[in-house]
Image (spheres, helix red, strand yellow):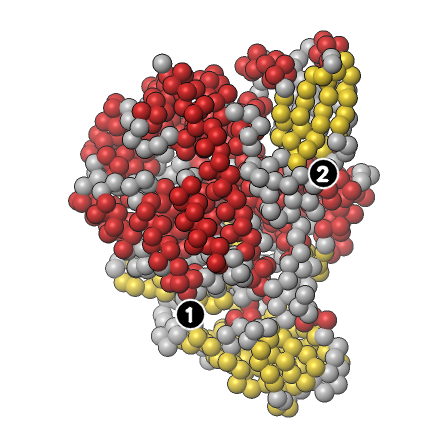
Amino acid sequence: MSKRLLTDFVPSNYQVYLDIDRQAKTIKGITTITGDARQKQIAVNQKFLKVDEVTVNDKAVSFQVDDQAETISLAVGQPGAVTVRIAYHTDLTDTMMGIYPSYYQVNGQQKELIGTQFETTAARQAFPCVDEPAAKATFDLAIKYDEQPNETIIANMPEEKVVDGVHYFKRTVKMSTYLVAFAFGEMQKKLTTTKSGVQVGVFATKAHQPKELDFALDIAKRAIEFYEDFYQTPYPLEHSWQLALPDFSAGAMENWGLVTYREAYLLLDPDNTTLDNKQLVATVITHELAHQWFGDLVTMNWWDDLWLNESFANMMEYLSVDAIHPEWKIWEMFQTSEVPMALQRDATDGVQSVHVDVDSPAEIDSIFDGAIVYAKGSRMLVMVRSLLGDDALRKGLKQYFQDHQYGNAQGDDLWDALGKASGMQIGDIMHSWLNQPGYPVVSASVVDGHLKLHQQQFFIGAGKDQGRLWKIPLNANYDAAPEIMGDADIDLGDYQQLRQANGQPFRLNVGNNSHFIVKYDETLLNDLLDHIDELDHITQLQLLQDLRLLAEGNQVTYASIVPLLARFKDSHSAIVNTVLYQIANALKKFVEPGTMQEDNLRQLFDQLSHHQVERLGWQPVAGESNDDQLTRPLVLMAALYAKNQGAMQSAHDLFEQAASLAELPAAVRPAILQNEAENFGTTELFDQLIHEYQTATDPGLKQDLCLATTKVTDPELLTRLVNQFEDASLIKPQDLRAWYRGVLANNAGQQLAWDWLRNEWSWLEATVGGDMEFATFITVTAGVFHTPDRLAEFEEFFTPKLDTPGLTREIQMDTSVIRSRVNLVESEKNGVNVAIEKAVH
Ligand SMILES: [Zn+2]
């Protein structure tokens, strides 16, 4: 383990002076750090900095730069209070890390907006610092830049004064280095104030219409008001700025007082957007604002407790959106997004646990596994919330904030606070979930007349059973079951008596808030299916979702699920339809393109969707339910996959009639554009889509255009497209993965995309290799492949890269993900195809 620098040097204040020249692409800096030296020799972090001079208490000293360790070491003479001044220079580069430019156009004119991204370890690229989350200090930012008229600069704190072109910002509160942020350039903004007087603002480039900022402003204001009330702790700063950056690697970043976002996650056209896009943007904003307390005010001590930040924010985003827009039933969306993501990934042997030991910067970046740290983590906290109830949760949180504000904490500090508030041994239960990877399948069966439960780790693909046990909140609907199941086996007693006394089918994990799946035996499953229409939508979803996972894990056959689908096809519930089509789409891997089997599957899609298409039609209807709004895109996409002639014609007509693409209703626009690209994909259309992509400013429209364009089938057009992957003036590096994935998932383009990835790997590494999202190019590849040939090619290419820092786990995981899918297809395809044929004939 590399040594923490904080052990030897505890900074209390940084004076950060920066002079940034966009034209020359240079940064000059002077950082003065006041702190307490605990040793004669100390070190601070730096990366890519060219150090010109170091003084200690105004005396020049010699220093050693270690680029490998990312440090500058220096002798301070005697331990005690010291002032270290470091003068340096560096380049302004396009890495989307540290201080970097975003590029955009207004009326054809090229512009730049400078922003920052310091999490996890990139503050050291901007200024020398003890770049560890526990090294909290105050920061005085002073920034000069090649300023033009109409430009503004914003930062964590309000600006205090401008002297000789240098912008001075108020001293920050005590905070971690990775949360420092600033941005400058031409910006538009919208402002409002919360009930408690916090100034809330949304900032964006002037490429956007002003109305695109409105939705975010409303959500941000209401989210801060919600959190101040829920946490019983005031928002600690004067302002909360939300800034959309045209180039941004992650989704958003919770810098204290200046949250940065991908444009697609902050801005939307309120006159033409989908409900799910609104929900997505709202949850991103509420996630980042939850961090202003949980993460920023109280920060994890070290990155091994990253889950403390992310799991919590990921739960709170739903809690607050549910309070702001109860009619959205956002917890239902949790069931179709985070839940399956966590259950799928967490079933792969070799997955990381939520709490994970980390050391080097590359390792730190690699633990941001969205399905684990975010999705599974949030599910852990949903489980905690349902055990504790909101009163104890709020009481515990208030105490936690009081005890650790402007400081740091570890997981157990949270469990202590929540344990005291609830009188429950919550830490004891949660350790079994956070420190072990994976999760259990609980089998419920009637054996010799007794209802018996058994827990065992659930695997998709090969897995080594190590006898892991979890403390499972069972949430059974029969009182005979205990609240927590800690043993491997339980006997609940005589089944017939229990069934009669309870008057309803036996169910586990009611509400689907605990992180396990249930395998009912035939008796219990049939009982449930006989009463399926009486059960709520979450239970219906859960039943289908668990069956799909059991099929992926070879515990039931996929073929046995096929006949069940028709029973749910006319549901008016968006989440039931979502899981229904998740399963239907999962069947595509079992059929080969251009075969009879594929025709049968298309027919199955037609049978599943055609009543719903008739019911819902191609145009959104004023006043229709949220469920109908969310169901329509699912069934239209299904009808198009089915090659339903009526659907294809309707989509084509709507395309022809629209005066502009921006005018197409956002809810049906992806289906219309994809139909056009797939079935009417001429060169002229291709050029039009590319041109629209280049000029559109609405992030939602841009995403639709990206997805549609990758669906063209003409090899010549696909070749042209792939040849433009590296043209940053067309496809921003932040968006490249979506384009790559789109072409890879297209049968006509897969070879091209895959060849591109392999041939251009060094280019990709040089372009986005430094950012945290790099490994996801491997993840999306593994998400598509399902044949033995592709598995062999994947292994041939990636196995030699296993030692690349930050990629090791992802390559191992993804190799087993593809392998288990290949094996599944091999063992199940005959049965599945027979079942599909039977269902459609
Ligand atoms: Zn977060």
Q: Residue at x 50, y 20 (%)?
A: 560
Q: Compared to 412, does 70 lie above or below?
A: below
Q: Please give left or right for residue 391 compared with residue 333 in the image.
A: right
Q: Residue at x 56, y 86 (%)?
A: 53
Residue labelled 1 has its Cβ within 8 Å of some atom of ligand 1: no
Q: Compared to 468, does 765 lie above or below?
A: below
- Confirm or deny contact between disc 1 and disc 2 (CB under 8 A): no
* Residue neighbourhood size for the residue with mark 1, other residues' Cα within 10 Å, grouped as few (<14), some (14–19), many (≥20): some
Q: Please give left or right for residue 411 compared with residue 285 in the image.
A: right
* Residue neighbourhood size for the residue with mark 2, other residues' Cα within 10 Å, grouped as few (<14), some (14–19), many (≥20): few
Q: Quadrant of the C terminus?
A: top left
| Residue annotated with mark 2 | 467
Q: Amino acid at mark 2?
A: Gly
Q: Quadrant of residue 104?
A: bottom left
Q: Position of residue 713 (x, y in %)?
A: 25, 40
Instruction: Tell me the mark number nearer the camera, choosing from 1 and 2.
Output: 2
Q: Quadrant of residue 13?
A: bottom right
Q: Position of residue 552 (x, y in %)?
A: 53, 32
Q: Quadrant of the N terminus?
A: bottom right
Q: Compared to 564, does 181 lie above or below?
A: below
| Residue annotated with mark 1 | 93
